[in-house]
Every structure is written in C-alpha cells, then in structure tokens.
C-alpha cells in the first residue's frame, strides 16, 4: 500500500470516530474545548504511533496465543510515559484530561490498530498507519471540540467570538450536548463521504 | 451506612458512568441493540467490575503504596483486569456451562471496557475504603446495566422508526443517548 493511501485511509475512509465508531469515550468526554481536544489528539497520536512501531518490530517474536496481553502491556507502557510527561510539562492539560489519559490504554482504537495492522505489517507502514489513524482521531475530536466550544462557551481556543450580550447554550459543554453533536457530525460526515465517493465513481 | 447509600445513588443516577462520565460508550453502543444481549453484558460487567475493583484496591494499598511505585498503576491495573477476565472466563466455563453460554461471548470484550479500569482508578483517586470501593463499583456497574437496558428497549423501537438515511444506526443512537442524558441530568442535586 502506498504511503498516501494509508494516510488517507486513516484520516477519511476509515476514520476511527466518524466511520468505524471506536474509541468514543475520550472523544465525548474531553472535547469540551478545542485546546483539550488537540491535546488529547496529540497524546493518542504519540501512543498509537509508538505502540504500532513497537508491536510491528516485535511481531515475529510475540506468540500468537498471548498477543493481546502483550499488546496491552506495550500500550500501557507508552500511556504511562505520556501520562508522566503531561504531568511534568503541562499540568493544566493534565488535570483537564484527568482520568482519560490512563484510559487511553483501553481505547479500542489503539488495540484495534495493533491487532489489525501493526501485527501483520512492516515497521514503516505501521508507523504511517499510526500517524494516519491518530490524525483521523485528532481531526474528529477537534471538530467536535470547536463546535462545542463555540455553541457552549461562545469562544474558540479561548478567544471570545461574540459580544457580551451573547448567551451561550451551556448544554453543549455538558454531557448531553456531546452525544447529540457527535451524532449529528457523524451524519454530516457520512453524507459528505457518500457524495464524494459517488462523484469519483 | 448513609455514606454507602449516597455513593450508590450518586453512581447509579447522578453521575451515571455512561450518561454523565462517558465511560463504557463502546460496549454501550455495541451491545445495546437487543434486550437479551444487553442483560447478559450488564451482568458480566457488574461481576467483573466489582471483583476487579476489590483486587486493584488491595494491590494499590498493599503493594503499590508500600513500595511507592504508584506510577506503575496503569500497567498493573490493566494487567490485573486482563488476567482476571481470563480467569473468570475459565472458572465459569468449568463451574457452570449454562452461565458460560450466556455470558461467554461478552467476557473477552470486558477487558477493553473502560468502566472496569475507570472505576478502579477513580476509587483510588477518591480515597475510598474497601466498603466504599465495593459500593461505588456495584453502583457504577448497575448504572451501566440500567443505561444498557433502557437503551436496548429504545433501540428495538428505533428500528421501526422512519429516520433520515444519514442518521440511521449509530448517529440516531447517539442523539437518543443525548436526550436520555438530559433526563438523567434531572437527578442532579438529589444528594
């Protein structure tokens, strides 16, 4: 597979959130502001790329029967590194993301890529797949974060957009708004994807 | 005693793990399409979460804290949960084949259910003692069970509804979840 194909696959055609619908917990929980979304996206890219490279390197050594526990330990190691790194250098983001950093371990997206791609493909391809899938995740969570921040707090990246008389709808930064907006975004993404695919055919 | 009751009510209704804390969304969306699978998954999750919380609590108190290696928490907890799930699967298979037939397919899925790891970590962060840990994990999994069963009932009806093409399947489920989440927000201030 060509590099651009793998990237495009992760970003659009097999977008983890909008198409495959995996790894949703952190997307819903963390996307209250655009900054938090991007921080979460970068953490996932880091863990996903590193674990993909590592699993791909070790794929000939890992026994087939215990591959899932081995994957989980490798992923948990990188998650711990990211966790400590954020705690030391970005304490604000660390407390905003909270429990969802350790929970990257059980993000189905990362385990799914390990099982479906890294375990059967070469190191370079796995690294690119990790970056592509991670970017797709970041793309989805950032869009959701921006929409939620505009509707729920009237700002983007902390910069206020509206005059003071504007009343933001608090429900969009609360839990219900996350579910409803993500549902609508998936619907929009599906429609666009279908239209572009019909156009290329 | 009052304390335990507050923890139970708060984890089942007010801070419901699915509707308010966004944990366990993947299995929630995955197995909530039929009532009987939802019940099976709910029972399995309740069992594993409670067991895992107790075991991780003991490990945290008597191993990680004593040797001051709390930074290994994530790795140790996920290992414990993964092996526990494996062990429970083998035990049930041996002891009760009927139960295994009912729950067997859900057990491997539970390792990647973030509720199990999430509850274990949150219990430690909240500084609960053993009894409170048990109460909070039972409450968390009952809350998940409740969400799953409610959603399954709703989705069986949704299948017959006339929905725009783009929203069919998961998007409409998410929107319905959002509406249920609004209803659950009504419990806020109960305790």
Image (cartoon, rainbow, N blue to C red):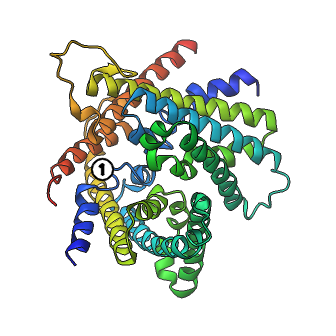
Q: Residue at x 82, y 50 (%)?
A: A58
Q: As drawn, is B188 to the left or to the right of B149?
A: left
Q: Residue at x 23, y 72 (%)?
A: B3
* Host chain of mark 1: B
Q: Position of residue B98 (x, y in %)?
A: 47, 81
Quadrant of the rendered structure where residue A154 is? Answer: top left
Q: Position of residue A18 (x, y in %)?
A: 47, 32
- Say above or below: A77 vs B107: above
Q: Position of residue A168 (x, y in %)?
A: 21, 24
Q: As drawn, is B58 to the left or to the right of A61?
A: left
Q: As drawn, is A112 to the left or to the right of B165?
A: right
The answer to whether residue B169 is seen in the rendering is no
- Say above or below: A70 vs A151: below
Quadrant of the rendered structure where residue B162 is? Answer: top left
B56 or B63, which is in the foreground? Answer: B63
Picture mark count: 1
Q: As drawn, is A143 to the left or to the right of A131?
A: left
B50 or B42, which is in the foreground? Answer: B50
Q: Residue at x 57, y 46 (%)?
A: A83
A124 or B97, which is in the foreground? Answer: A124
Q: Position of residue B60 (x, y in %)?
A: 53, 70
The quadrant in which the N terminus of chain B is found is: bottom left
The quadrant in which the C terminus of chain B is found is: bottom left
* Mark 1 neighbour density, 10 Å: few (under 14) some (14–19) many (20 or more): many
Q: Residue at x 40, y 77 (%)?
A: B130
What SS does tag 1 mark?
loop
Which residue is at the far bottom?
B95
The answer to whether residue A19 is seen in the rendering is yes
Quadrant of the rendered structure where residue B84 is? Answer: bottom right
Residue wearing tag 1 = B19
- Say above or below: B23 vs B178: below
């Amino acid at each position: 597979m060509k590099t651009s194909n793998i990237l495009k696959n992760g970003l659009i055609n097999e977008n983890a959130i909008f198409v495959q619908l995996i790894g949703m917990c952190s997307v819903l929980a963390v996307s209250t502001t655009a900054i938090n979304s991007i921080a979460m996206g970068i953490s996932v890219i880091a863990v996903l790329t590193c674990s993909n490279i590592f699993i791909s390197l070790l794929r000939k050594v890992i026994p087939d029967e215990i591959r899932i526990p081995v994957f989980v330990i490798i992923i948990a190691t990188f998650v711990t590194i990211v966790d400590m790194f954020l705690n030391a250098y970005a304490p604000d983001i660390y407390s905003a993301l909270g429990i969802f950093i350790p929970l990257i371990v059980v993000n189905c997206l990362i385990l799914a890529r390990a099982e479906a791609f890294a375990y059967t493909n070469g190191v370079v391809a796995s690294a690119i797949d990790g970056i592509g899938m991670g970017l797709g995740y970041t793309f989805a969570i950032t869009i959701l974060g921006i929409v939620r921040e505009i509707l729920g707090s009237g700002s983007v990246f902390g910069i206020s957009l509206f005059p003071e008389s504007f009343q933001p709808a608090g429900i969009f930064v609360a839990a219900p708004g996350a579910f409803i907006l993500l549902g609508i975004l998936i619907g929009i993404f599906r429609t666009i994807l279908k239209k572009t695919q019909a156009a290329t055919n | 005693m009052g304390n335990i009751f507050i923890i139970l009510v708060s984890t089942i209704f007010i801070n419901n793990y699915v509707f308010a804390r966004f944990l366990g969304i993947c299995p929630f969306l995955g197995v909530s399409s039929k009532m009987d699978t939802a019940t099976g998954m709910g029972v399995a999750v309740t069992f594993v979460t409670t067991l895992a919380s107790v075991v991780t609590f003991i490990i945290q108190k008597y191993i990680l804290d004593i040797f001051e290696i709390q930074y290994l928490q994530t790795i140790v907890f996920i290992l414990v949960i993964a092996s526990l799930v494996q062990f429970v699967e083998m035990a049930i298979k041996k002891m009760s084949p009927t139960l295994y037939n009912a729950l067997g397919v859900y057990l491997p899925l539970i390792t990647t259910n973030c509720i199990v790891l999430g509850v274990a970590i949150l219990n430690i962060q909240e500084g609960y003692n053993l009894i409170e840990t048990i109460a909070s994990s039972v409450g968390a999994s009952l809350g998940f069970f409740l969400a799953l069963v409610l959603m399954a009932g709703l989705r069986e009806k949704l299948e017959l509804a006339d929905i725009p093409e783009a929203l069919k399947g998961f998007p409409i489920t998410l929107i319905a979840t959002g509406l249920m989440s609004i209803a659950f927000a009504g419990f806020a201030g109960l305790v």
